[in-house]
Amino acid sequence: MSAPRRPSDPSGLERYYVLTGGRSGPGGSASSLDVATLVVSRSDPVPGMQHEHEEIIRRCREPLSAAELGAHLGLPFNILAVLLSDLLDTGRVEARDPVPAHEAGRGPDLALLEEVLSGLERL
Amino acid sequence: MDLKGFDQAGRHTAGDTRSVKVMIAGGFGTGKTTMVRSVSDIKPLTTEETLTQASADVDRLIGVADKTETTVSLDFGKIGLNDSLVLYLFGTPGQERFWFLWNGLFKGALGAVVLVDTRRLASSFRAIEEMERQNVPFVIALNVFPDSKDYPVDEIRDALDIPGNIPVVAFDARDRSASRDVLVALIHHLRDRSAAAVESR
């Protein structure tokens, strides 16, 4: 695990500003995005699309977590979330949050736990 | 379950894939990344979370140049459990000053493994307190380092003040099957809790 740091290259911030059109966090559909949310493409890239949007669509032909996307694209999570919200809002990708969604006072489903167990036991 | 757009029946069967999340917590240097690495199907990756949310109201008036943005890294791995279920393991940042972030991190997690270095028990006190405060179900895993004294599990349970219903297991984080067994212990614990909750209804 690497130590926390401040971005040493100020141009990083400028780059993110350009990528997101100056937005610092996602609105609407992506505001609850989790690191383990799975993203899957629902369309092909179209000409003239922002490079990062195209890249997300290409990489998510198979479901990929938001954390993996961020790692592959080299983008901090909140910047990725802004880009994902554009694609979610236009229906170009879909997102599925990890199960169980947070519900106070309710533990995970027993059937799900059994499924996790049998998967682990096969390792 | 929170579905976004999945109601429009997927033409990709891939849309049926689900994910679950387990957090690997513990003090700095207790072996969180080692455990993720030994049990993950992929080489561990790092995702960066930029912390500005806590001071968002203040920052709005301040120029970018003044911003004290800090980035924490989460190392993570994944395990394909079956054709349609993926388990993601996230190591939490070990630095105490970022623990305010944990509210968001633990949302949606099945539970957590708290790693303890038996030579430095105190380094995991804060992690255990956080699990209790946030009501995150967890197991304690003693990472047995080669030069660790052979601590009896019961003594450590007492020293850490862990209630009897929470499993405390010893393992070597470098070993894949031992790490897998810790995850199995966590899922057993979650199952017992859920079963108990159903009975008491």
Image (tube, rainbow, N blue to C red):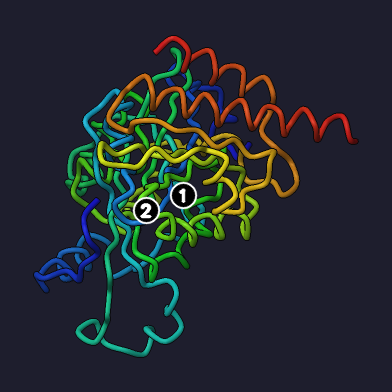
Report if residue A90 is visible in the image: no
Depth check: give the residue in front, B133 or A55. Answer: B133
| Vertical arrangement, residue B33 with respect to residue B29, above or below | above
- Mark 1 near mark 2, Cβ–Cβ under 8 Å? yes
Front-most of residues A108 and B136: B136
Q: Quadrant of residue B75?
A: top left
Query: Which image quarter: residue A36?
Result: top left
Q: What SS does tag 1 mark?
A: loop
Q: Chain of mark 2?
A: A
Residue at point 45%, 75% (across, down): B54
Q: Identify the residue position indicated by label 1 in the image.
A: A33
Q: Name the residue at the bottom extreme.
A: B61
Residue B186 visible in rendering: yes
Q: Which of the two labelled residues, at mark 1 and mark 2, occupies the earlier sequence position?
A: 1
Question: Disc 2 designates what residue?
Answer: A81
B118 in relation to A13, above or below: above
Q: Quadrant of the C terminus of chain A?
A: top left
Question: In what element is the residue under mark 2?
Answer: helix
Comparing A34 with B133, the one in front is: B133
Q: Position of residue A87 (x, y in %)?
A: 37, 45
Q: Quadrant of residue B139?
A: top right
Q: CA distance from mark 1 to mark 2?
A: 7 Å
